[in-house]
C-alpha cells in the first residue's frame, strides 16, 4: 500500500469525479488531499481533509475499494493527523441516507455527535460524527491488540 499527499491536484480531481454532484457541493475547501494505492499502484481511495478550526479536521472519503482502510493507513492517520499536525479530533458529515458511510464510521469508532437538519441542498439532513485522538488510539488497541 502507498499513501501519497496530493501535490499536483490530480488526486483531488479523481475524488471529485467519483463523487455525486450533491457530495461535491458539500466540500468546503481542499486543505489536504491524500491518495491511497495498492501495491500495483491501483487507486483505492482518496481523502480530502478540510480544516474546521485548529483542533478539528473534517474528511471527505471517496473509495473505489473497501480495502483502503488498512492497518498501515490507520497508523499513518494517527501519526500524521494527531501527532504531526496536532489536531485533537477528526470529524465527518454524512448524508442521513448514506448507510455505507454510517456503517464505516461506526465500525471505526467514530461517535455520533448529532444531526445537522436540512443542511444538504436537497433538503436532507447530515449526520455528524467525530473521533478524538484518545478514542482513535483506544480503538486501535482494541482492533490490533
Image (cartoon, rainbow, N blue to C red):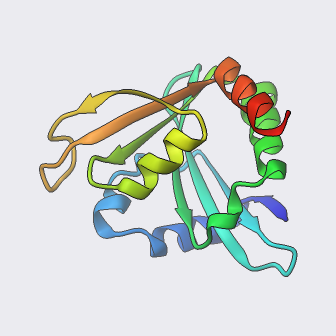
Q: Height in image: 58 above or below 44?
A: above
Res 38 visible: yes
Image-quadrant location for residue 98: bottom left
Image coords of residue 114 (percent x, y): 31, 26
Res 29 visible: no
The reply, left or right, for residue 112 in relation to residue 115 is: right
Q: Residue at x 41, y 51 (%)?
A: 27
Q: Which of 86 and 43 lies nearest the eye of the viewer? A: 43
> Split into 4 quadrants, where in the image is the N terminus?
bottom right
Q: Height in image: 52 above or below 23?
A: above
Q: Which residue is drawn at 50% across and 29% down?
A: 130
Q: Residue at x 64, y 20 (%)?
A: 88
Q: Which of 8 and 39 lies nearest the eye of the viewer? A: 39
> Split into 4 quadrants, where in the image is the C terminus?
top right
Image coords of residue 34 (percent x, y): 69, 56
Image-quadrant location for residue 43: bottom right
Counting labels gives: 0
Q: Height in image: 55 above or below 49?
A: above
The reply, left or right, for residue 77 in relation to residue 92 is: right
Q: Height in image: 95 above or below 126?
A: below
Image coords of residue 78 (percent x, y): 77, 34
The reply, left or right, for residue 103 in relation to residue 36 is: left
Image coords of residue 25 (percent x, y): 32, 57
Amino acid at each position: 500500500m502507498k499513501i501519497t499527499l496530493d501535490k499536483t491536484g490530480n488526486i483531488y480531481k479523481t475524488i471529485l469525479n467519483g463523487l455525486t454532484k450533491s457530495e461535491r457541493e458539500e466540500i468546503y475547501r481542499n486543505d489536504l488531499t491524500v491518495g491511497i494505492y495498492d501495491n500495483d499502484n491501483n487507486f483505492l481511495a482518496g481523502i480530502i481533509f478540510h480544516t474546521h478550526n485548529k483542533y478539528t479536521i473534517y474528511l471527505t472519503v471517496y473509495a473505489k475499494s473497501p480495502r483502503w482502510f488498512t492497518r498501515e493507513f490507520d497508523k499513518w492517520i494517527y501519526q500524521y493527523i494527531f501527532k504531526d499536525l496536532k489536531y485533537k479530533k477528526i470529524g465527518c458529515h454524512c448524508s442521513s441516507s448514506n448507510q455505507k458511510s454510517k456503517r464505516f464510521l461506526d465500525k471505526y469508532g467514530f461517535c455520533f455527535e448529532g444531526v445537522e437538519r436540512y443542511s444538504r441542498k436537497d433538503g436532507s439532513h447530515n449526520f455528524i460524527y467525530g473521533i478524538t485522538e484518545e478514542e482513535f488510539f483506544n480503538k486501535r488497541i482494541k482492533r490490533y491488540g
